[in-house]
Image (cartoon, grey):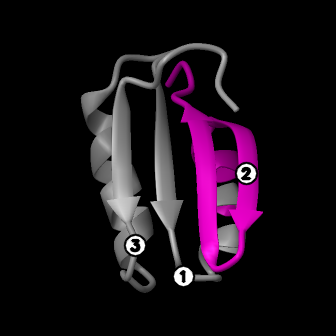
């Protein structure tokens, strides 16, 4: 899934909208541009929300995957 080891891992299992995106937003503020993180969640709305978050704020959604009821995302912080 990843090109290199992510700088941070977010576990949003059991959390519902808007909490996974809020955790992602806080983590992105801590990371340097170009750093990557992973997020795992169980809320199906993250499929839409994470992609929209990345597009709107200029981050790269490198991979998204669903395994049963779990959703996994690998994201690289944009240059902004």
Q: Is residue 3 visible?
A: yes
**How far apart are labels 2 and 3 at the CA level?**
15 Å
Residue 14, image quadrant: bottom left
**Pointer 2 or 3: first along the chain:** 3
Horizontal side of 57 relative to 20 (left or right) equals right
Horizontal side of 66 relative to 59 (left or right) equals right
Q: Name the residue beneath numbered marker 1.
A: 43
Horizontal side of 66 relative to 29 (left or right) equals right
In this orientation, which residue lies closer to the viewer: 30 or 79?
A: 30
Q: Is residue 71 above or below residue 32?
A: below
Q: Name the residue beneath numbered marker 3.
A: 13
**Pointer 3 or 1: first along the chain:** 3
**How far apart are labels 3 and 1 at the CA level?**
8 Å
Q: Is residue 74 magenta?
A: yes
Residue 64 bears which disc, if any?
Answer: 2
Q: Is residue 57 above or below residue 66?
A: above
Q: Is residue 70 magenta?
A: yes
SS of the residue under disc 2? strand
Quadrant the N terminus occupies: top right
In this orientation, which residue lies closer to the viewer: 79 or 7?
A: 7
**How far apart are labels 1 and 2 at the CA level?**
14 Å
Specify few, some or many for label 1: CA neighbours under 10 Å numbering under 14, 14-19, or 20 or more.
Answer: some
SS of the residue under disc 1? loop
Q: Which residue is painted at 45% across and 25% down in the image?
A: 6
The residue range painted magenta reads 52-80
């Amino acid at each position: 899934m990843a090109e290199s080891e992510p700088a941070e891992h977010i576990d949003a299992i059991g959390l519902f909208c808007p909490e996974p995106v809020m955790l992602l937003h806080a983590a992105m503020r801590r990371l340097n541009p170009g750093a990557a993180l992973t997020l795992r969640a169980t809320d199906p709305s993250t499929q839409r929300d994470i992609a929209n978050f990345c597009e709107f704020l200029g981050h790269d959604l490198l991979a998204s995957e669903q395994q049963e009821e779990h959703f996994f995302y690998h994201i690289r912080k944009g240059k902004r």
